[in-house]
Amino acid sequence: MYDTTRREGAVTQDDIKIQARKVQVFYGDKQALKDVDVDILDKTVTAFIGPSGCGKSTFLRCINRMNDTIPIARVEGEILLDNENVYDRRVDPVQLRAKVGMVFQKPNPFPKSIYDNVAYGPRIHGLARNRAELDGIVEGALRGAALWNEVKDRLTEPGTGLSGGQQQRLCIARAVATSPEVLLMDEPCSALDPIATAQVEDLIEELRTQFSVVIVTHSMQQAARVSQKTAFFHLGNLVEYGDTDDIFTKPKDSRTEAYISGRIG
Amino acid sequence: MSDQSADIAQRHDWGSARFQSNLARRRRNEKILAAFGLGAIAMAFLVLAILLWTLISGGAQAFRQTHVAIEVPVSAEWVDPADPAKGNYRNVIRDAMQTTFPDADPSELRALSGILSNAAQFVVRDKVVADPSLIGQTVSIDVPTSDPYDQLNKGNVDTQSAENTRRLSDADIAAFQQLKDQDRISLPINWALFTNADSRFPELAGLKGAIVGSAYALLICFLISFPLGIGAAIYLEEFAPKNKLSDIIEVNINNLAAVPSVVFGLLALAVFLGWFGMPRSAPLVGGLTLGIMTLPTIIIATRAALKAVPPSIREAALGVGASKQQVVFGHVLPLAMPGILTGTIIGLAQALGETAPLLLIGMNAFVTAAPATPFDASTALPTQIFIWADSPERGFVSRTSAAILVLLGFLVVMNAVAIWLRNRFERRW
């Protein structure tokens, strides 16, 4: 297990990046999240854990408004990103998603070349003024995702031809190419083998020096390994939120204790 | 645990008669199912084989046409050098028959002229008009024989039957035999089948008008149904709110796909011809009608293809901040394209073979020229088949089969293109 306390000294944790206030989500008549209040810190890995259907992925998808694409989903409350409510009328979800990148459970590269996969976000948002700048962004993103050395000689080959772990890192590169401020990861390792998982976890550790990383995971070991903060969700409630070490060693809530000791879930 | 519950730890005697008969029954059922499947496929192949056999055996003759080569003396008596187009070429042909059969008396000459197709005089006329210096000289022509002699040459006339039961008398047959002995009769490939439009005379009738008419109609059908169908499908599948109204629209589109085609013909008759006063028998109207008919097919195929695109691709694009429109046109549509194209070509192939709506807008008219524009009167391949199948002349029997073969040929080509397009577009990803 990581000794997180020592590493935390290296980064500033004081800045609150995301503040959720009384967030409630309904799918039709069914309430999926109840009054979630949480402060997510900048340059920190925050893990959401909890049994299946507890609302952790739902909450993650509220942060970049991916729930907007579900017609029956309804979100109440406020999620402040740098003190601006992402559900404000003036916020365009399209631009929000450039600022809040997302990595999904299953690697889902576009059926395009490796280069075009990474360049897609910068292209649609007009981040590069010319080809050279775009090349620079792509290289930077692939280096950031620890994939550059493996693919630099075959950037024109299809992204779908990579191995599962490489595909997931390509998706991370695609997400970081727009220089997001927050990176959301929805069980990014659940479709990967242990070696690829270890690579992605190392990568997360790197990424947190630049972004606020929020990761949903089913694996408590993973949460303990990669995160500094952990939030435990149960039946749509945020039960407990605190330093990862505290959650795993001295949970305050009996449900948290039951979950991490394997009695519910 | 209740008393009735079985002891799952007990060991079964798998070799016992009870289990063996159970196993035998299951094996038998599987064999019966396989036999039914094989039987069904064999049946389908048999029917297909019979269809193709009757068409080919019946239609093959139509791809060849008996021709006769004769010398035609063009006399200034019948053709005025000042105005060669107005000449009496019927008499010119009679002179030619007199030269070929020196012994025939005038009453016999009339019957002998019937060996040549009606086209013979026009062939001579065209030659003379193109080169008036031919007047007073002899022109060699190689023209189709008329249908009864064509049938005779192809062995379709029983010369042993009673003379009054056939169209050709013994004298006619003898005259034809004389031409044959002079080596004037040949049986070349019947290019007229593709270069001529319809005619009352089977030996002159061709499919050019029908092919061009069908091509125009299909082009207009494609231009109408492809963009409209894809647009409607994209809107319904990707942008329309899911509510009662969109449900009703979906149900109605599905119903529309099942509406008998003749109903679309009635609609076109009332709307395009009645209200808008569009020209009758025009490929334009035919294409519009077929386009409306194909629209639901394309909408349904496109929606299915869009639905089949994995949601992970949409999420991936949305996740990096693509707008809805960028997701649909940049990611979903390209992936759905093979399915859309396949559905479209299947729909067009269906439209190509559709007869009933074209009958109602008058595309079964007797038109002897291929349409120059989609606004000209024309037939289409299926209606041409309909017209020929209805004609009494013997020569149209084999020509009907030949026309069906041509139509089937186009359908096979279109389906092959559909498969090729699908493979091509799929390989890219």
Image (cartoon, coloured by chain):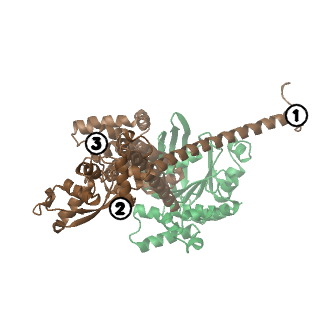
Chain colours: A green, B brown
Q: Disc 2 versus disc 1: distance between alpha carbons?
A: 83 Å
**Image mark 2: chain:** B
Query: According to the image, label 2 marks what residue?
Result: B184
Quadrant where the N terminus of chain B is found in the figure? top right
What amino acid type is highlighted by mark number 1? Ala
Q: Disc 3 versus disc 1: distance between alpha carbons?
A: 74 Å
Are discs 3 and 2 both within one chain?
A: yes
Q: Are marks 3 and 1 in contact (CB under 8 Å)?
A: no
**Image mark 1: chain:** B
Are discs 2 and 1 both within one chain?
A: yes
What amino acid type is highlighted by mark number 2? Arg
Query: According to the image, label 3 marks what residue?
Result: B365
What amino acid type is highlighted by mark number 3? Ala
Q: Is residue A11 visible?
A: no
**Image mark 3: chain:** B
Question: Dot 1: within a 10 Å radius of its alpha carbon, few (fewer than 14), some, or many (20 or more) residues?
Answer: few
The location of residue B317, given as percent across then percent down, is 48, 56
